Image: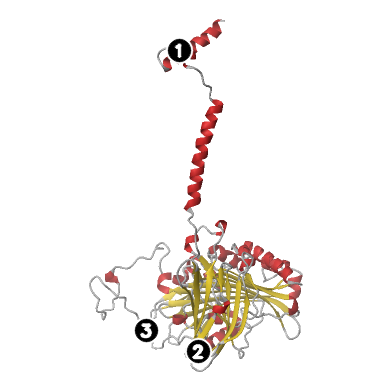
Amino acid sequence: MLPFLVLLLFNALLAYATDYEERLLLRPLPRSALLASFQFRSNESSTSFEQQNFRYFPRSLGQILQHAHTKELHLRFSVGRWDAESWGQRQWNGAREGGTGVELWAWIEADDEEQAFSRWLTLTNTLSGLFCASLNFIDATKTIRPVMTFSPEGDHPNPSKLHLLHGTLPHEVVCTENLTPFLKLLPCKGKAGVSSLLDGHKLFDASWQTMSIDVRPVCEENGDCSLEMEQSVDMVLDIDRSKRPRDNPIPRPLPIEDIECDTSKYYNGHDTCFPLDKQADPAWTLTEVFGRPLRGACPLTDTEGPNSHTVCINTPPERTVNANTTGQYEEHRYASDTMRCYKLPTGSDIDLELPEQQMTTGLVLGTPPLYAARAINGHGQERGSVQAVIRNPSTSTAVDFVYLEALPWFMKPYLHTLRAQVTGSSENPIKETYYRPAVDRRRGTHIELKLTIPAGATLTITYDFDKAILRYTEYPPDANRGFDVAPAVIRVLNPQSSDRRGAYLRTTSLLLPLPTPDFSMPYNVIILTSTVMALGFGNIFNLLVRRFVGADEVPSIGGGLIGILKAKVQRIRGRFSR
């Protein structure tokens, strides 16, 4: 319950409607892990946005949204997997989390579906150039139209003309080329404020990280509307790994004499060691974890009131936290001293230091509403099956949720084999089903299920599928690696929650092996054909160009090559003598 209250408090600190706000939440996790959650929020009035009078809202993104008639946008760049068993509940209830790779969904204003899809292609192509990503590869085969999974977060006066489109690129590799344009959208552009800690070397070395951009219209009770943009960066860092110096990028094991071994293990010896699990919290600083200190407050943020405390640490009250800076800062505590927030100095660096400390109060982690895992079963190159296992950790409350899968067209499921079974129950948990079959090379399969899982139960979803054979030109260069299948999206339905963002979780992506031809055969055919062509062309060319003479017509001058040269010299002399 405590992590949920802390999350509500952190959201309340962001609820003040100022033009620009930014926050950083640090929360230690088990096994020397650290959750760093960056939040940036900017507002622009609708009148200024329509007149292209941008102040805090980035002009580059605003003009793209106007050109594509996009009223609400959600973009995700994600790497890794959230370990719910160890790290507990997801940050922001998974609302700012995306599947592996790139995930994009938007509400586009259009008169019909054809016009909406045309504007969707315009949006993906322009965002591809803005964020240096392969969003232009989101075509009709990777686009679906969800009906139950997503709901608008903004206030839309004319929702009847809005069309929801969703696309994924699970094979996209997220790297520094995506972080740089992300930082350029911020007012301080990573030069000051909490964004100065975002370093590509540390961000993409994290165990899990996600970057999100959310744009939505917000209207007040008096009728004033504005366009709100949230940018979030959430990552889980390994403290010991992050403290490794940059000049030693390759992690090397320590000598056995420098490792604290667990001597209670029966296999402990002079050459065998099991590392001892330390009970004390490790020491770390912002400079060690992020590679640089925090470069003061962003001058565009609010310097007075609750919004001025921009860096918060969620630790037990007994944890020692020291602030090292030459400027003036303030510390404020919330939620029974478990949340400490700091007002950053302007123009001065600040570093937070937490020494190694033996703790008597353990970490309190929130329990996620559901646990989910998905895998491909079977063997062979013709068919297989998918199995999704969803578990409800609550012992008193049933959970309603929506399960969404967007499958590629070459993965052909059989709907009559779809089975959803709850352990210890014969009741069918499926309440609603939406199924849109695939069309070869035109669109993929779209499945949405509305299910109910009882308290403390485990739900298993299975179905069979066939694998299609692609054309030779449709295989990627690494065809033998397999094809990535987008993660399944699970939306937890909670009617008691007033948060319009909702609660989500995503499974890991799948790696689907397809029947792959022998790509060496075209090479062999090319080599053989080239050899035959060379031999045939060479013989015909010799017959057409070379002049054949009889042996008696050759001058009988001895000496071989020397004789031929002498004959040529005599012939030249004869011409000059004439």
Above/below status of 177 relative to 459? above
Mark before the other along the chain sequence, 2 or 1: 2
Specify which label sits upstream in the sequence, 2 or 3: 2
Q: Amino acid at mark 1?
A: Lys
Q: Residues within 10 Å of mark 2 (few under 14, many from 20)?
A: few
Query: Which residue is at 43% across, 64% downward?
Result: 246
> Left or right: where does residue 182 sit relative to residue 388?
right
Horizontal side of residue 360 vs 341, given as left or right: left
Residue 132 x, y percent position in the rendering:
59, 62
What residue is shown at x 50% (from left), y 70% (from top)? 383
Q: Assign a secondary structure to mark 1.
A: helix
How far apart are the alpha carbons under marks 3 and 1? Answer: 103 Å
User: Where does residue 479 sit, x and y in percent of width and height?
Assistant: 50, 60
- Residue 2 numbered mark, or none: 2
Is 336 placed above or below 265 here?
below
Disc 2 or disc 3, which is closer to the eye? 2
Q: Is residue 310 visible?
A: no
Is 539 in front, or is 348? Answer: 539
Quote the CA–CA distance across marks 2 and 3: 21 Å
Front in this rendered view, residue 130 or 98: 98
Q: Earlier in the sequence, mark 3 or mark 1?
A: 3
Element on which disc 2 rests: helix
Disc 1: which residue:
566
Report crowding for label 3: few under 14, some 14 to 19, many 20 or more residues within 10 A (C-alpha): few
The tag on residue 358 is: 3
Give the amino acid at mark 3. Answer: Gln
* Tags 3 and 1 touching, CB below 8 Å: no
